[in-house]
Image: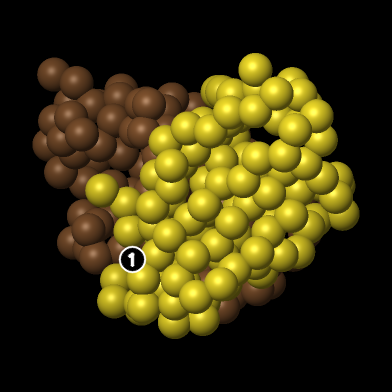
Amino acid sequence: QSVLTQPPSVSGAPGQRVTISCTGSSSNIGAGYNVHWYLQLPGTAPKLLIYGNNNRPSEIPDRFSGSKSGTSASLAITGLQAEDEADYYCQSYDSSLSGSVFGGGTKLTVL
Amino acid sequence: QVQLVQSGAEVKKPGASVKVSCKASRYTFTDYYIHWVRQAPGQGLEWMGWISPKSGGTHYAQKFQGRVTMTRDTSINTAYMDLSSLRSDDTAVYYCARDPGGGLDDYFDYWGQGTLVTVSS
């Protein structure tokens, strides 16, 4: 069981907007630690999508955005495209565990 | 472009040890922490710990303390992750990843291609 909780799956039609939640607790997200997001295509290494809650690396399109509030964070994807179909993971730091923690991952299906 | 190139797949018997390497290039190796993350088949990502290539200092996830050792060789820009007393549930793809900031809640901007470690009798 992951310290950060994500829905196992989400889906949306091309062009639509989807959000993926990441719920933590007072020892991680709620303590003010940053949340980061990664995308993983099958058989490949994770790729950084969002860092520091809402910052995008230069090569990531602005269709992807992140937010954080309280003990939760969210990743939003607008203008859904077929190539967005992948697994998405959130990551933060947990002071009780004294280390980085990941969410269990969310599989995005583009209908 | 930053590159992290890992060693090849390994097959080990239960109780054995495995050492995975991660060779860095196209950046100053000693300026960025290296973390190790693993992913069991069909499962999510699990953080294992980090090493500071500059000082050699390490910090391991509680789950792996006593079984994992992270080292580095600055002469060849390579980090290593050694996992001992292997069990079948250690079967996973092991990734190294670069940490651009070195802070507690930092992120991983570049990842190695992954090394599959299979533990089977």
Q: Which chain is yellow?
A: A
Nearer to us in this view, B22 or A40: A40
Letter of the brown chain: B
Residue B47, x across and y down, in percent: 40, 55
Number of numbered markers: 1
Residue B26, x across and y down, in percent: 80, 52
Is residue A49 placed above or below B63 in the rendered structure? Answer: above
Q: Is residue A56 left or right of residue A108?
A: right
**Amino acid at pointer 1:** Tyr
Position of the C terminus of chain B, as image quadrant, is top left
Disc 1: which residue: B60
Residue at left offset 25%, top offset 37%: B90
Q: Residue at x 38, y 52 (%)?
A: A5
Q: How is the image coloured?
A: by chain
Q: Quadrant of residue A54?
A: bottom right
Q: Chain of mark 1?
A: B
Residue B52 higher or lower than A85, as above or below: below
